[in-house]
Image (spheres, rainbow, N blue to C red):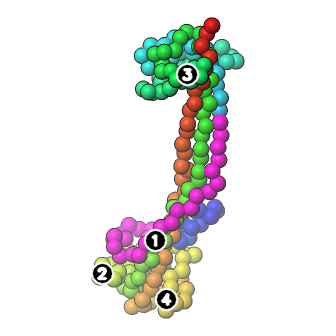
Amino acid sequence: MTIRHFVMTGMALLALSGAAAGQATSTSDTTKGGTQFTSESMTGEVVWVQENWLVARMEPHQNYAFFNVPAGREFMIDGQKKHIADLKMGTTLTAVVVTRQTPVTVRTVSTLNATVWWVQGNFVILTHENGENHEYQVPESYRFTVEGKPASVHDLRKGMKVSATKIVEEPHTDMATETIVTGKAPK
């Protein structure tokens, strides 16, 4: 079991829906991992241009590739800025695509204070501070805090004041690309 699954299942108090907004205290923080850069280069010769469409014969396999060029894209041809309408057949283009990937984890910790209204096995109904009852299916490994000490769902009794903490980690990757196109016009 991965750490992510352990945190999400082992610490997940709210297995059944019913957590009402404003009843738990939540804090979030974001952690970023090491950024990785990759680059890819491709070269081709312009064989056809019309509006924003460009067809190039790609090196080294001589296959044809079609590109829908974004409006305003600039090409550096022989050191001068050009647009797609300025490209001539036979121009050799080299595109370098640099990709930046940064792993990001958003960790949210929510704390809930409640009173045990009913408990049976791994099922508990808690009365939140606003007076609403909510029911939960609690994993065996989860620990509540009762009078400053850890307690399993089996230790709970009606009327006990409990504190519960839920930790959710949401990993994702921030990604950005930058493409630089240079070229050499035919002689």
Instruction: In this rendered view, identify the residue nearer to me: 49 or 6.
Output: 49
Q: Position of residue 46 (x, y in %)?
A: 57, 14
Q: Is residue 55 above or below residue 118?
A: above
Disc 2 element:
loop
CA gap, disc 2 to disc 1?
Answer: 20 Å
Horizontal side, residue 46 vs residue 25: left or right: right
The residue at which mark 4 appears reads as 146
Tag shown at residue 130: 2
Disc 1 element:
strand
Q: Quadrant location of the C terminus?
A: top right
Disc 4 packing (10 Å; few <14; some 14–19; many ≥20): some
Horizontal side, residue 162 vs residue 97: left or right: left
User: Which three-letter amino acid code belongs to the residue tagged 1?
Assistant: Thr
Seen as rendered, the residue at the extreme left is: 131
User: Which three-letter amino acid code belongs to the residue tagged 4?
Assistant: Val
The residue at which mark 3 appears reads as 80
CA gap, disc 1 to disc 3?
Answer: 51 Å
The residue at which mark 1 appears reads as 27
